[in-house]
Image: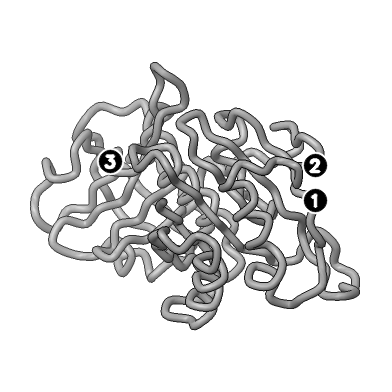
């Protein structure tokens, strides 16, 4: 079994090792891949749940995610209570278990076969993803659906934003939540792109490497997934050939606004 563990613990944080250890206690044959997202970034969490869950992978696949800003209630939190745990089943059989917070399920809400609450304590530990939640995830992996609660309807989950930084990869490419289908431009059209407070000239391209060295491309990127049997979404990226788009725009954070206009 492959387990993608997505959380905002921080790259290299021992929390990943602690949670992995609890999951492997009863799933000893599993292989765990850890992905650290920025602190409290439910947008990055949701983006990677969809990117990893809706693209080809092994038949036995669990995505276990935890990004819980505890922003569902701004009052004091008795007993470390936080957002509730949920279970989503994707059309390809991938199981998704984790906290429903912000945009964590926004990218899959209209694609999932079903989404349910999980009957498990919302409190009891500051470190719920280690101490409380693994038992429910393990039960569901083993086919025990007795822990499932009420169904969650798509309209109960917020729509994903359509104009944000979703991720910055190791090359400094900026992945956005702008759908390529909504960008109606001819190749080589010159545009002005704003990310946060920073502005740069760019060239729209239908393939990033078609631009010359040193040119900032605004192009359909490598991220995307099938929405249904016939329709696929691809997300726009900002790509500086021979450099870093992230540095060009002043090292923006995930979640910052991205806009563009024709020059």
Report how many numbered discs are placed on residues in the image.
3
Which label is found at residue 219? 3
Indicate left or right for 164 with 244 as reference.
right
Q: Residue at x 62, y 54 (%)?
A: 137
Q: Extreme top residue here?
A: 230
Regarding mark 3 in the picture, which secondary structure is present there? strand
Q: Residue at x 62, y 49 (%)?
A: 103
- Mark 3–mark 1 distance (CA, rounded to whole Å): 43 Å
Q: How is the image coloured?
A: one colour
Indicate left or right for 213 with 252 as reference.
left
Could you say which is closer to the camera, residue 222 or residue 50? Answer: 50
Could you say which is closer to the camera, residue 48 or residue 17? Answer: 17
- Mark 1–mark 2 distance (CA, rounded to whole Å): 6 Å
Location of mark 2 (residue)? 149
Sequence-wise, the earlier of marks 3 and 1 is 1
Q: Residue 256's x, y, as percent?
A: 52, 58
Q: Residue at x 11, y 41 (%)?
A: 210
């Amino acid at each position: 079994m492959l387990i993608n563990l997505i959380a905002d613990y921080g790259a290299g944080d021992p929390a990943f090792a602690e949670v992995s250890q609890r999951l492997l206690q009863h799933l000893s044959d599993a292989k765990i891949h850890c992905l650290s997202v920025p602190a409290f970034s439910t947008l990055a969490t949701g983006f990677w749940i969809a990117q990893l869950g809706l693209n080809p992978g092994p038949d036995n696949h669990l995505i276990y995610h935890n990004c819980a800003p505890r922003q569902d209630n701004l009052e004091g939190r008795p007993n470390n209570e936080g957002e509730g745990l949920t279970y989503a089943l994707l059309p390809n059989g991938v199981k998704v278990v984790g906290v429903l917070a912000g945009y964590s399920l926004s990218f899959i809400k209209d694609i999932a076969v079903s989404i349910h609450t999980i009957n498990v304590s919302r409190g009891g530990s500051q470190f719920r993803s280690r101490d409380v939640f693994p038992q429910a995830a393990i039960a569901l992996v083993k086919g025990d659906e007795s822990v499932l609660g009420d169904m969650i309807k798509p309209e109960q989950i917020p729509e994903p934003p359509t104009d944000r930084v979703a991720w910055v990869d190791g090359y400094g490419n900026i992945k956005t939540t702008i759908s390529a289908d909504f960008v109606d431009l001819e190749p080589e059209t010159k545009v002005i792109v704003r990310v946060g407070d920073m502005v740069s000239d760019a060239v729209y391209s239908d393939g990033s490497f078609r631009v010359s060295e040193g040119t900032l491309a605004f192009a359909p990127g490598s991220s995307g997934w099938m929405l249904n049997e016939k329709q696929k979404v691809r997300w726009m990226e900002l790509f500086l050939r021979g450099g870093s788009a992230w540095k060009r725009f002043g090292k923006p954070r995930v979640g910052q606004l991205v806009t563009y206009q024709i020059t």
